[in-house]
Image: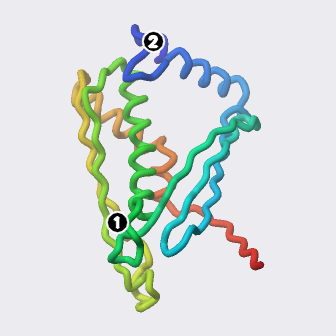
């Protein structure tokens, strides 16, 4: 597929570099294993700061430095100094599937004019507050709409959409239960 695209850069993506990654993974499956880790510290009231300092790919540690701040709105006892964890969850979902749409279009040689994903959900605070065992603490459904425009056909965009649903890590993570291995350290 990569050698059928005329322009080596589509939607800002370097397709020859993507081809090199794919070839490396095809020749050595251990190169496909990526690991991500974050450390979150409470900074007062409902605010926290999360630090991203590296990820691993194929066993190699790649250093990077990012900070993500979370807080609750004033009505939920925060200071509204940053998005809350639910908004960050939706933002992470949107950002992940955005990569899929952009890459999928690039691989087809489709130049995007615009891409916007709107995501929303409602949860019942009685679950979070432990006021009712019959109310779940989180979402029962999340709705999202993808608005995409470019020089591809509706059929091209439908194919890209189906591929994103099948291959997006965060679509997988949000749409299916995943095992959480908890460990509590006190002191």
In the rendered image, which quarter contains the C terminus? bottom right
Across and down, in percent, residue 155 comes to 25, 30
Along the polypeptide, which appears first: circle 1 or circle 2? 2
Does 150 sit left or right of 20 as displayed?
A: left
**Relative to the observer, which residue lies in front, 34 or 81?**
81
**Relative to the observer, which residue lies in front, 76 or 55?**
76
**Residue labelled with disc 1:** 141
Q: How many marks?
A: 2
Does 65 sit left or right of 80 as displayed?
A: right
> Which residue appears at 41% of the width and 73% of the height?
78
**Residue labelled with disc 2:** 8
Q: CA distance from mark 1 to mark 2?
A: 39 Å
Across and down, in percent, residue 53 comes to 66, 46
Task: Give the number of the mark in front: 1 or 2.
Answer: 2
Q: Secondary structure at mark 2?
A: loop
Q: Please, is residue 18 above or below residue 60 in the view?
A: above
Across and down, in percent, residue 142 comes to 34, 61
Q: Secondary structure at mark 1?
A: loop
Q: Please, is residue 25 above or below residue 46 in the view?
A: above
The part of the image, by quadrant, that contains residue 135 is: bottom left
């Amino acid at each position: 597929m990569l050698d059928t695209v005329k322009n080596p850069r589509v939607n800002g993506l370097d397709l020859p570099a993507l081809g090199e990654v794919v070839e490396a993974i095809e020749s050595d499956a251990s190169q496909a294993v990526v690991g991500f880790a974050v450390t979150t510290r409470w900074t007062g009231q409902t605010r926290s700061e999360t630090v991203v300092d590296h990820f691993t790919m194929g066993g190699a540690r790649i250093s990077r430095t990012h900070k993500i701040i979370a807080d609750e709105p004033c009505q939920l006892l925060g200071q509204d100094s940053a998005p809350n964890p639910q908004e960050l969850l939706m933002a992470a979902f949107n950002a992940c599937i955005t990569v899929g749409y952009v890459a999928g279009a690039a691989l087809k040689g489709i130049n995007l004019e615009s891409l916007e994903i709107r995501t929303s959900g409602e949860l019942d605070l009685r679950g979070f507050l432990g006021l009712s065992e019959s109310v779940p603490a989180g979402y029962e459904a999340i709705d999202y709409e993808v608005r995409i425009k470019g020089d591809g056909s509706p059929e091209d965009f439908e194919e890209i959409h189906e591929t994103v649903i099948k291959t997006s890590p965060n679509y997988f993570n949000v749409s299916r239960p995943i095992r959480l291995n908890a460990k509590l350290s006190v002191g």
